[in-house]
Image (cartoon, rainbow, N blue to C red):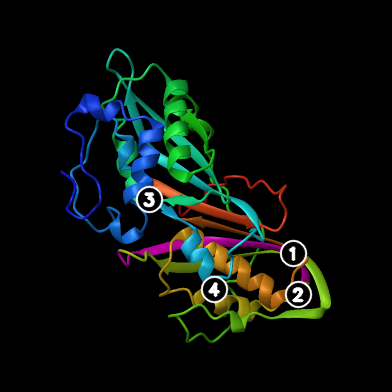
Amino acid sequence: MLARGCGFKPPSDTVQRRRIGAAAVRSRYTARMTSAEHSLLGKSVAYRDEYDASLLFPIPRAGKRAELGLDGTLPFHGVDIWNAYELSWLDPRGKPVVALAEFRVPAASPNIIESKSFKLYLNTFAQTRLAGADVVAQRLRTDLSAAAGAAVDVRLQTSADFAREALHELDGECIDGVEVDIADYDTPRPDYLHGDADVVVEETLVSHLLKSNCPVTGQPDWASLQIRYRGPRIDRAGLLRYLVSFRRHSDFHEQCVERIWCDLRARCAPEYLAVYARYTRRGGLDINPFRSSEAGDVPGNPRGARQ
């Protein structure tokens, strides 16, 4: 049984759970699941291994975006790339199949999906018989799109292709070696950000020092960050101080990246700006938000050494 207070009443039997359609799932989300405090984060749960889409817990983006002054048309474009490393189901004869999965959730979607609920949902495929990877992908696509409120792209990679996987770090010049004194860790400090309007550059900077905390459990979230921009040269010492000031800050991955993008735009006035965070995995999932000033930007999905 799920922990009390999670806002979910389990259906009476397995057959009923399997017949929950995307419309019913969306209705239940809208009625009961709206804030992180009502999610399964930090609560004890029993792991289910038969398909149950109703476990997915969407959280509206609007509240946190309002804190950044984003109430209308978004100033950025982008996507949240999720990678799942613990996906398995049964073939029609009962033999297990394993796969890696990539999910792309549009930044313009009204909801993010809470990560523990995502993990629990994926676990419910483990004892579910399905006809093949295409069927699994379509079911994932339907359920996740209903939760996010927008079309989610799903790609599966079965074990036959695992050998093609390779590590690749984010491109760019790492600024972590900059000598700098740092004393602020509790609240993001955009006042540290400065751009030199007399020197216009186009460059890509990388740092592996981004850390924030889950706003519900307080657990640490670790990430590598890439900043691509064209415009006034950003002071690197100030940028490093700014990124480290997130160290005790509590927000979800997507919200941290949007805050960084908005702060850089406001303080440094770049003509072009893209921010990409590659977070380490938790519960077999990693989350990698990308935000850009250009609609045509489509990020790759490079798996770093820490992922």
> Marks 4/3: CA distance?
23 Å
Q: Secondary structure at mark 2?
A: strand
Q: Quadrant of residue 143?
A: top left
Q: Amino acid at mark 1?
A: Glu
> Marks 4/2: CA distance?
17 Å
Which of the numbered marks, if any, corresponds to residue 115? Answer: 3
Return the disc, 1 or 2, that comes first in the chain's sequence.
1
Q: Secondary structure at mark 4?
A: helix
Which of the numbered marks, if any, corresponds to residue 243? Answer: 4
Q: Are marks 1 and 3 in contact (CB under 8 Å)?
A: no
Return the disc, 4 or 3, that comes first in the chain's sequence.
3
Q: Amino acid at mark 3?
A: Ser
Give the camera-side residue of 67 and 296: 67
Q: Which residues are magenta?
A: 217-231
Q: Residue 189: image x %, image y %? A: 54, 81
> Marks 1/3: CA distance?
33 Å
Tell me if residue 156 can be seen: yes
Image position of 161 with respect to 76: above or below? above
Q: Are marks 1 and 2 in contact (CB under 8 Å)?
A: yes
Q: Are marks 1 and 4 in contact (CB under 8 Å)?
A: no
